[in-house]
Image: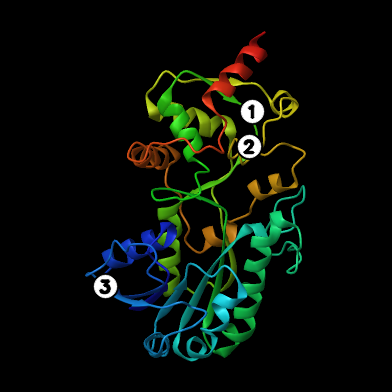
């Protein structure tokens, strides 16, 4: 099939391109060119800023496409300029969005759940609000133009080339070994989905009938299952110390930023680890075994070792462990 990918040189887009090439599809990338492409000289690249399309980019967008995958639209400006050509040229248009657009609550979240305000002023929700506006724009201007529209709302995606460092904190900590401070409750829910599972499902949609909004989130697991799997795969002498969120919060630890993947009971976003992906599963979504995903992520982490300043420092971790054990 003729496939156009908007973006395609980073994380999810990169895995999408790799799998599409393996399937023998005819690919074109439309991207800014700011990230060096691992596919240079292999497939056609068209370089442009989406907010100010070049004449070449406009011509490419008007070519007939079996599928267009929009991997990098983060606000309405990114989809507005591509509206006119794509509404006539794309048989299937897939927009990658985020489960962050849902309004957090205590119940599980499905495609029918309420969303946040599209004009949200809370800085913590600014990015999901922009995603939601982009969703609504393509639904009005591309979905009604004849293209089959799929809005893939992604949960926490992990894998090689992940720039978020959400899982990397725990991978790096496991590789370093020793006593490991874990502020999460062992039964805290975690839903991690392998990037290759996401890419495979997205490509499969070209020959399926699924349309509209579909959640892509991982199977429900606990923090204990994930941490134990990481420590086992790392093969070091790491020993988890489950200090509990009350102790961690009392001592000023910052959930999610300083200690990624930690979501206390008091944080509404904890609901984003209770996403229903049954619609995607009915359409063919399958999950890679957790140990395989962790092994692949650890392999990549060993190539890029580091410790960002935003993470809990090793010195502070030792201090906290000493206080907890006293």
Q: Position of residue 150 (x, y in %)?
A: 54, 73
Going from N to C along the chain, the mark reached first, 1 or 3, is 3
Position of the C terminus, as image quadrant, is top right
| Quarter-of-image position of residue 15 | bottom left
Q: Mark 3: give few (<14), some (14-19) or many (20+) Cα within 10 Å.
A: few
Q: Mark 1: give few (<14), some (14-19) or many (20+) Cα within 10 Å.
A: many
The residue carrying mark 3 is: 43
The residue carrying mark 1 is: 183
Q: Are marks 1 and 3 in contact (CB under 8 Å)?
A: no
Q: Is residue 111 visible?
A: no
The residue carrying mark 2 is: 262
| Quarter-of-image position of residue 120 | bottom right
Q: Is residue 67 visible?
A: yes
For the image, the number of numbered tags is 3
Q: Residue at x 74, y 42 (%)?
A: 267
Going from N to C along the chain, the mark reached first, 2 or 3, is 3
Please state which of residues 287 and 235 is positioned toward the viewer in this rendering. 235
Answer with left or right where residue 144 lies relative to residue 20.
right
Q: Is residue 69 above or below residue 250?
A: below
Q: Are marks 2 and 1 in contact (CB under 8 Å)?
A: yes
| Quarter-of-image position of residue 43 | bottom left
Q: Is residue 250 above or below residue 25?
A: above
Q: Mark 2: give few (<14), some (14-19) or many (20+) Cα within 10 Å.
A: many
Position of the N terminus, as image quadrant, is bottom left
Q: Position of residue 245 (x, y in %)?
A: 70, 28
Q: Is residue 267 above or below residue 79?
A: above
Q: Residue at x 59, y 35 (%)?
A: 259
Answer with left or right where residue 292 lies relative to residue 42.
right
């Amino acid at each position: 099939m003729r496939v156009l990918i908007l973006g395609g040189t980073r994380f999810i887009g990169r895995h999408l391109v790799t799998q599409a090439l393996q399937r023998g599809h005819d690919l074109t990338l439309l991207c800014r060119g700011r990230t060096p492409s691992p596919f240079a000289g292999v497939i056609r690249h068209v370089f442009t800023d989406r907010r100010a399309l070049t004449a070449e980019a406009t011509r490419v967008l008007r070519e007939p496409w079996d599928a267009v995958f929009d991997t990098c639209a983060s606000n309405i400006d990114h989809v507005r300029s591509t509206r006119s050509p794509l509404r006539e040229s794309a048989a299937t248009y897939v927009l990658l969005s985020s489960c962050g657009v849902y309004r957090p609550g205590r119940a599980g979240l499905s495609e029918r759940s309420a969303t946040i305000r599209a004009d949200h002023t809370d800085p913590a929700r600014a990015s999901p609000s922009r995603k939601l506006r982009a969703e609504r724009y393509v639904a009005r201007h591309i979905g009604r133009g004849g293209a089959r529209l799929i809005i893939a709302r992604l949960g926490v995606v992990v894998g090689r080339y992940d720039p978020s460092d959400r899982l990397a904190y725990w991978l790096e900590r496991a590789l370093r070994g020793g006593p490991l401070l874990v502020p999460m409750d062992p039964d805290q829910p975690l839903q991690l989905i392998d990037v290759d599972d996401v890419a495979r499902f997205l490509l499969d949609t070209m020959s399926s009938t699924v349309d509209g909004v579909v959640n892509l989130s991982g199977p429900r697991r606990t923090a204990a299952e994930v941490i134990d799997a990481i420590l086992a795969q790392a093969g070091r002498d790491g020993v988890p110390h489950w200090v509990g969120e009350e102790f961690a919060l009392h001592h000023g630890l910052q959930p999610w930023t300083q200690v990624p993947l930690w979501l206390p009971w008091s944080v509404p976003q904890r609901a984003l680890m209770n996403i229903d992906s049954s619609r995607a599963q009915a359409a063919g979504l399958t999950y890679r075994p957790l140990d395989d995903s962790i092994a692949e992520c650890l392999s990549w982490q060993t190539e890029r070792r580091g410790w960002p300043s935003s993470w809990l420092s090793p010195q502070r971790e030792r201090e906290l462990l000493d206080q907890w054990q006293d």
